[in-house]
């Protein structure tokens, strides 16, 4: 459906980047490039089911352009010939552009996930998407405080560590959400599909057995849910009768 590509892309662009950026490798820009391409593939597929995902393309495309600057700097560092126009001032300006684009990508992406989750009646997933978006905003505020608010160097160092930890936690929460979407959100034509038929009957028997067990487990879970809701409704009705007495 697209969440697989989106998960892998997010993993590369935001988590693998941290590892790849460690010196002397310094290849974070390559991880981001791969991540953006995978995310774009996932978003393109998901936009077939929820048009709001298209809003993610614009900031993601700008992030790709910004990453080209990082790629040039990475190659320059590898060959020991960084372009003269890549000054500290330009680096700072690009970093601020990157910060804004990252927030924009998250805002557009998780808003679209929330809308899609609501469309398939997964309110918990929608709430998780909005919650994660709030966490991203919290990280953004911490970053702004660290970068702009004058404070003693010891405080600044401590604040930097805090915002790095929050950033890592936000990334892990977002990856968990995308995994949940991969598991719980599927297009209607992919649901309850019979197992693929193979040339060898042994594989067909294994597939049939697995599919039938999956169906029985789903029916059992549905029955348990219905029984729970029925008992809960009966308890409420009994409480109402007792209050009337």
Image (cartoon, helix red, strand yellow):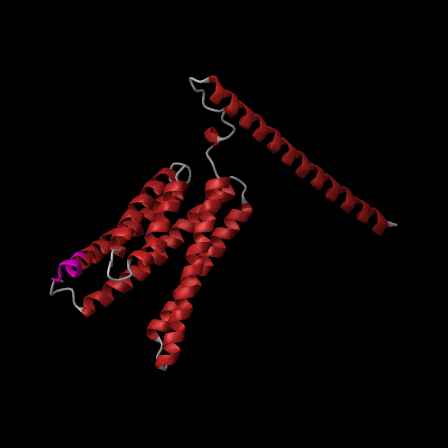
The residue lying at 34 percent from left, 53 percent from top is: 16
32 versus 82 height, above or below: above
Q: Is residue 21 left or right of residue 167?
A: left
Magenta-colored segment: predominant secondary structure: helix
Nearer to us in this view, 171 or 18: 18
Q: Is residue 239 left or right of residue 122?
A: right
- The quadrant in which the N terminus is found is top left
Q: Position of residue 231 (x, y in %)?
A: 75, 41
**Which quadrant of the structure image shows residue 158?**
bottom left
Range drawn in magenta? 75-81
Q: Residue furthest bottom?
A: 152
The residue lying at 28 percent from left, 47 percent from top is: 34
Q: Residue furthest right?
A: 245
**Which quadrant of the structure image shows residue 154?**
bottom left
131 versus 220 height, above or below: below
Q: Position of residue 191 (x, y in %)?
A: 50, 30
Q: Position of residue 121 (x, y in %)?
A: 54, 41
Q: Can residue 105 be seen here?
A: yes
The residue lying at 40 percent from left, 62 percent from top is: 167
Q: Position of residue 43 (x, y in %)?
A: 36, 43
Residue 208 painted magenta: no
Residue 77 painted magenta: yes
The tally of labels here is 0
Q: Can residue 136 be seen here?
A: no
59 versus 135 height, above or below: above
């Amino acid at each position: 459906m697209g969440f697989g590509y989106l998960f892998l892309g997010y993993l590369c662009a935001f988590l693998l980047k941290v590892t790849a950026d460690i010196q002397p490798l310094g290849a974070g820009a390559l991880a981001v490039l791969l991540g953006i391409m995978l995310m774009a593939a996932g978003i393109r597929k998901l936009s077939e089911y929820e048009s709001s995902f298209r809003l993610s393309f614009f900031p993601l495309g700008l992030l790709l352009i910004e990453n080209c600057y990082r790629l040039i700097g990475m190659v320059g560092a590898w060959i020991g010939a960084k372009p003269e126009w890549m000054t500290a001032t330009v680096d700072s300006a690009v970093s601020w552009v990157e910060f804004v684009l990252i927030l924009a990508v998250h805002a557009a992406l998780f808003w679209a996930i929330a809308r899609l989750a609501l469309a398939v009646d997964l309110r918990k997933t929608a709430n998780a998407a909005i919650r994660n978006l709030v966490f991203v905003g919290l990280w953004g505020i911490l970053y702004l405080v660290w970068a702009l608010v004058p404070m003693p160097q010891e405080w600044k160092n401590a604040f930097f560590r805090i915002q790095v930890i929050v950033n890592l936690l936000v990334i892990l929460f977002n990856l968990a959400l995308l995994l949940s979407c991969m598991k719980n959100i599927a297009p209607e034509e992919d649901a309850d599909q019979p197992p693929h038929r193979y040339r060898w009957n042994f594989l067909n028997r294994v597939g049939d057995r697995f599919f039938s067990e999956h169906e029985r487990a789903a029916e059992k879970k549905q029955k348990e849910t219905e029984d729970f809701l029925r008992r809960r409704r009966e308890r409420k009705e009994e409480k109402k009768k007792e209050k009337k007495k």
